Amino acid sequence: MLKNTTILLIFLFILTGFFKIPASACVGARALAMGGAFIGVSDDVNAIYWNSSALSRLQTIESTYTRTLGGGRAQINYDDFVGVAGPLPQYVDEIELAYGVSFIKTSTAVLDYDRFGLSLAAGFGEFALGTNIVYMDAEAGGESDNDVGVDLTFTYWLNDQITFGLLIQDFIQTEIFNTEFIRNVRPGVSYQLTDNLLLAAEIYALNEVDFREYQFGVEYNLPQIDELVLRAGNYQGAFKTFGAGLQVTDNFSVDLAYLDDNNVQIRQLGITARF
């Protein structure tokens, strides 16, 4: 009883801090709290966006919803994220198949669009391949446009501690209002330093010098309180991020993320359920 009360008080303290400020941001509260350095991690349903190939190691169906809170919904791209992913029937012993479906609601100063995604993954032991087929429906200035793009993803599990991931975003480029999204090559790595400490790093836009950024993240599971996880990171080389996750039950968790730098304030709440 005392342990559960302590967990609840700590989490409510963190939550209170989050609700004092406006915000918004990237896909998944857990990923944002780790500075967006998630391509080499991607061990849950959020892999739908970050690295779909890693879905091949999901053992159960997972669903998630992330909500960008407060006035910050107008500050940065992604407002709401809904995703479901899980394993597919295994017809060949050596190949693990998985799927994911997702929806992202996006609003910017000049463009609003809905992003619908279908993710497929195939795992071959230590190596996995994946793809996202993305349909985008956009509106701007009373006009509308839509297009389809394709992402490619790869994962290599070197051992139980080190994982390498790669996302080639818009491998087949999406074109909206005669403007192509950049082809974005994003390598990432994660290192499980101890049972309780996970480190992650990522390069955003490796192939585009003008857009290139470096992202870092850490996740620490408190040894005294197994249900509570603390996170921090550096997002796009400029913004500090923080967050926490609470495992409410074996099949249900809640995540919070916060980014704050002068005029940019981002706050997200995510929930994940496993079946």
Image: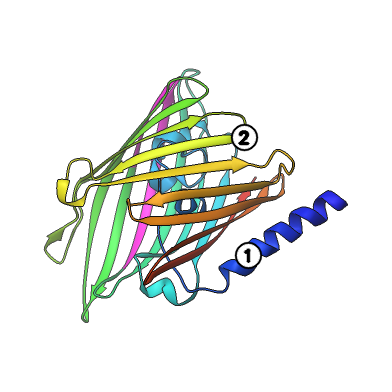
Q: Secondary structure at mark 1?
A: helix
Query: Going from the N terminus, do you reach mark 1 or mark 2 first?
Result: 1
Tell which residue pokes out farthest to the left in this image: 178
Mark 1 crowd level (few <14, some 14–19, many ≥20, 10 Å Cα): some
Residue type marked 2? Asn
Tell which of 43 and 76 is nearer to you.
Answer: 76
The answer to whether residue 69 is above or below residue 203 is below
For the point 82% across and 56% down, which residue is it? 5
Q: Residue at x 43, y 28 (%)?
A: 163
Instruction: From the viewer's perspective, tell me whether residue 213 is left or right of residue 64.
Output: left
Give me the disc on residue 196.
2
Asked if residue 110 lies in the magenta stretch, the reply is no
- The reply, left or right, for residue 149 in relation to residue 115 is left
Q: CA distance from mark 1 to mark 2?
A: 22 Å
User: Total number of numbered labels?
Assistant: 2
Does 262 sit left or right of 178 as displayed? right
- Point out the image quarter for the C terminus: top right
Crowd tier of the residue under label 2, counting other residues whose Cα lies within 10 Å: few below 14, some 14–19, many 20 or above = few
Which label belongs to residue 15? 1
Where in the figure is residue 119, as x and y percent of width and height? 39, 44
Q: Which residues are magenta?
A: 113-131
Residue at 43 percent across and 46 percent down: it is: 48
